[in-house]
Image (tube, helix red, strand yellow):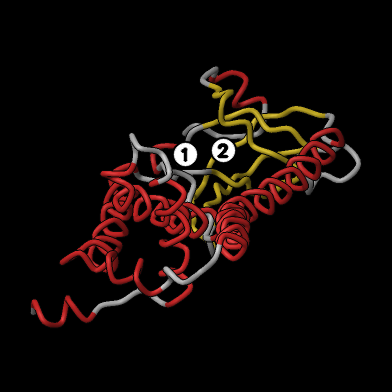
Amino acid sequence: MEVWLKKIRPPKYLRYFFFIIYRWYSSYSSEKPTAHYTAAIFLAIPHSLVYISICILFGVQRISKLYFLFFCLFILVIHYYMFLYKDKWKGFLQEFKHLDRKKRGKGTYLVFLYLIFFLFIAIYPAVIRSNENSDSYKLETSRSNRLDTYGIAKCISIQKESSSNFVFFEFYIGTRKVLGATAIEDIDESLINKYFKVKYSSKKINECKLLLNHPVTDTVAIKKAGFSLN
């Protein structure tokens, strides 16, 4: 096991970045004793951002702090064995010690671009998701503006379709029964057979939305809405 761990080496570009970061930090006397640790952690940070990017990309609404800390710890362990285990970093310094000041300066820019690249990977899915939510909000707002009439509806079922949950309901316009569905975040079976206000379009009655924050318990109003409570 120990022999195998000794053989673990980061790709050359990461060894090069480690050298550049180490040289930059070791130029400060206060940082020199721990410059190798700082360089390894510096490289681990952008790699940890991948977790956030993946969560956002796949639509994870709440990022678990525990999982995030576990992932960061995993990344740190990997970087420890790549750079610090058995003082591997000393060999990396020897590998690139021939570089002159000009090439080291170029390396600083490359490290900066590398960090920007991973920040972009982490942020870009969030921007895409934000635009999708904005478009969805505009569509929902436009739809809500068309809903101009209120009534009372009965929740009849809750179902999961694809990646969304829906509550299905029914209400009456005169003697006509209308069926509708509204997206919800979490499945709550206690909503079934309960009554809520419904908002719908007087021009297109199939365009409707159940208002779950407006429950109706007035039996007289429920009966007037066309429901039988027997």
Which quadrant holds the N terminus?
A: bottom left
- Of all residues, the one furthest to the right in this rendering is 203
- Pick the front one: 67 or 139: 67
**Which residue sits at x=38%, y=47%?**
26
Element class at badge 2: strand
Image quadrant where residue 209 sits = top right
- Image coordinates for residue 82, horizontal then vertical, percent: 28, 68
* Amino acid type at mark 2: Lys
Image vertical order of residue 61 relative to residue 173, above or below: below
- Pick the front one: 134 or 144: 134
- Pick the front one: 51 or 38: 38
Q: CA distance from mark 1 to mark 2?
A: 6 Å
Image quadrant where residue 202 sits = top right
Mark drawn on residue 193: 1
Counting other residues with Cα less than 10 Å from the Cα at mark 1, is it few (<14), some (14-19), or many (20 or more)?
few
- Image coordinates for residue 78, horizontal then vertical, percent: 27, 64
The answer to the question of whether label 1 and label 2 lie on touching residues, with beta carbons closer than 8 A, is yes
**Which residue sits at x=41%, y=77%?**
11
- Image coordinates for residue 53, horizontal then vertical, percent: 52, 56
Q: Earlier in the sequence, mark 1 or mark 2?
A: 2
**Which residue sits at x=49%, y=58%?**
160
**Which residue sits at x=25%, y=78%?**
8
Image quadrant where residue 7 sits = bottom left
From the viewer's perspective, is 206 left or right of 179? Answer: right
- Pick the front one: 134 or 220: 134
Residue under circle 2?
154
- Image coordinates for residue 197, horizontal then vertical, percent: 64, 28
Element class at badge 1: loop
* Amino acid type at mark 1: Asn
